[in-house]
Image (cartoon, grey):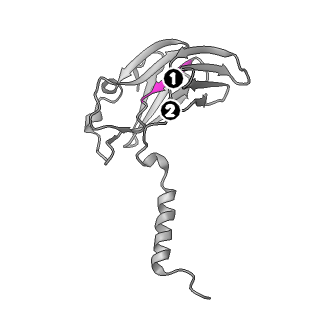
Amino acid sequence: MPKLFSRAAQVGVCALVFHLGVPMHAADTPPTLRQDVKVYSPDRHFYAVSSVAENHTSVFRAGSKKPVWELPGYAPVLYLSDDGRHLVKGYEGGNILPMNAKGSEIFLTFYSGPTVAATLTLDQALPHWRELGKSTSGRPWGDFWGFEKPTEFVLRLHDGKKLAFNADTGKRVP
């Protein structure tokens, strides 16, 4: 059988396949682009749409075009609970905190319907964020995991630990 590729080409292809096989959440994720966002509750009974042009966010029951409730402002990072009442607006900078991040920056905002239930700063949500390792882009903190229960919102830290928050109060859940 003829040799189709050189050894160097085979190694390069293997490296490319390995690189493409690495989960994207393991890499530095840049901030999201400003575009309309549509997210569903885990059970898909509700969805939320955040519009750049209209500068507002609306929550709908699946199959309906009439909002159940609305918020002023655009929010590119959203998570909606199964009850359609709880919504979390997250930090917009992706999974990397900039080196010049400030602990007073808003990291999570919890809504119960159109009412702000709680707001957590970076210091409150991730008290040890200054101890995180560094990458060329900043400090990888982890990812938003979403709602595990209608009132329990979860973050997964870069080291694999889980942080859960009560969506009604913003307080940590053990």
Point out the image quarter for the N terminus. bottom right
Q: Amino acid at mark 2?
A: Arg
Residue 162: x and y in percent read: 42, 35
Q: Nearer the viewer, residue 51 or 168?
A: 51
Q: Residue at x 47, y 13 (%)?
A: 116
Check disc 2 and report its element: helix, strand or loop.
Answer: loop
Looking at the image, which residue sits at the far right? 63
Residue 70: x and y in percent read: 58, 15
Q: Residue at x 60, y 88 (%)?
A: 2
> From this viewpoint, is residue 54 visible?
yes
Choose the circle earlier in sequence order: 1 or 2.
2
Magenta stretch?
86-91
Quarter where residue 169 is shown: top left
Is residue 23 within the magenta segment? no
> From this viewpoint, is residue 149 visible?
no
In this rendering, position of residue 124 left or right of residue 109: left
Residue receiving disc 1: 74
Looking at the image, which residue sits at the far front? 53
Quarter where residue 119 is shown: top left
Q: Amino acid at mark 1?
A: Tyr
Q: Residue at x 57, y 30 (%)?
A: 36
Check disc 1 and report its element: helix, strand or loop.
Answer: loop
Point out the image quarter for the C terminus. top left
**Quick check: 70 above or below 39?**
above
What secondary structure do most residues of the magenta stretch adopt? Answer: strand
**Quick check: 109 above or below 145?**
above
Is residue 87 within the magenta segment? yes
Residues at circles 1 and 2 in contact by the CB criterion of under 8 Å: yes
User: Which of the numbered marks, if any, corresponds to residue 34?
Assistant: 2
